[in-house]
Image: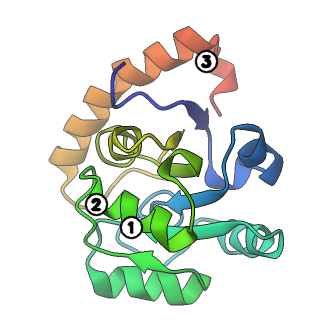
């Protein structure tokens, strides 16, 4: 199996329901920051995310932010959302994912990793045996533009393969 291939795909984080998480066997969420919960390199949350987080917390869902962002940024996001965070996690290396699962008191196989990058978020989640969910990036990155353009080009055939395997039509991708 391609370690960058997600098990599931949604348009946005806020499209995922508690029922979806339970249906796929999730007992806790490991959430990316940039372009998943907040806009890239910004303190501006993607519309609906803070309320979605509050709703999930109210329903008893365990959550941890896992980010390659500097610890100061991860700490700010953590404080604003009221959930723990691990910054400078070195995704896709497994250590941050393992630590996140331990913080939630669950097995990696019970953790749903949600992120917008196949080669960091999804690959790392797959390496530790987590349930991986790709969400479309909220907007185009404004930093390291050439690097991200190259990554997104390399992601495209993997996502096309995911869509082909799962019978997703172009108008269903969101």
Depth order, front residue of 139/1: 1
Residue 129 located left or right of residue 9: left
Residue 5: x, y in percent?
41, 27
| Disc 3 target residue | 170
Give above or below for 158 relative to 21: above
Depth order, front residue of 164/152: 164
Dot 1 or dot 3, earlier in sequence: 1
The local crowd at label 3, few if under 14, some if 14 to 19, many if 20 or more residues have their Cα within 10 Å, is few
| Element type where label 1 sits in the image | helix
Q: Quadrant of the C terminus?
A: top right
Q: Are marks 1 and 3 in contact (CB under 8 Å)?
A: no
| Disc 2 target residue | 95
Q: Quadrant of residue 70?
A: bottom left
Residue 85: x, y in percent?
44, 77
Residue 47 located left or right of residue 72: right
Q: Alpha-carbon distance for marks 1 and 2?
A: 6 Å
Give above or below for 30 relative to 22: below
| Disc 1 target residue | 99
| Element type where label 3 sits in the image | helix
Q: Alpha-carbon distance for marks 3 and 2?
A: 36 Å
Depth order, front residue of 5/164: 5
Dot 3 or dot 2, earlier in sequence: 2
Residue 75: x, y in percent?
40, 86
Q: Are marks 1 and 2 in contact (CB under 8 Å)?
A: yes
Q: Which mark is residue 149?
A: none
Circle nearer the viewer, 1 or 3? 1
Residue at 54% x, 30% y: name it. Answer: 7
Numbered label tally: 3
Q: Alpha-carbon distance for marks 1 and 3?
A: 37 Å
The local crowd at label 2, few if under 14, some if 14 to 19, many if 20 or more residues have their Cα within 10 Å, is few
Residue at 75% x, 76% y: name it. Answer: 54
């Amino acid at each position: 199996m391609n370690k960058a291939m997600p098990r599931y795909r949604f348009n946005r984080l806020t499209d995922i329901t508690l029922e979806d998480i339970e249906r796929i066997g999730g007992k806790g969420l490991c959430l990316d920051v940039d372009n998943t919960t907040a806009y890239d390199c910004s303190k501006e949350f993607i519309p609906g995310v803070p309320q979605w987080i509050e709703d999930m917390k109210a329903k008893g869902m365990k959550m941890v932010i896992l980010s390659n962002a500097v610890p100061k940024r991860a700490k700010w996001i953590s404080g604003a959302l009221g959930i723990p965070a691990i910054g400078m996690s070195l995704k896709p290396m497994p250590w941050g994912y393992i630590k996140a699962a331990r913080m939630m008191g669950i097995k990696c196989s019970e953790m749903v990793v949600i992120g917008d990058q196949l080669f960091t978020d999804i690959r790392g989640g797959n390496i530790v045996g987590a349930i991986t969910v790709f969400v479309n990036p909220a907007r185009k990155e404004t930093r390291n533009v050439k690097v991200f353009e190259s990554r997104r080009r390399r992601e495209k055939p993997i996502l096309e393969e995911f869509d082909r395997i799962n019978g997703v039509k172009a108008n269903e991708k969101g």
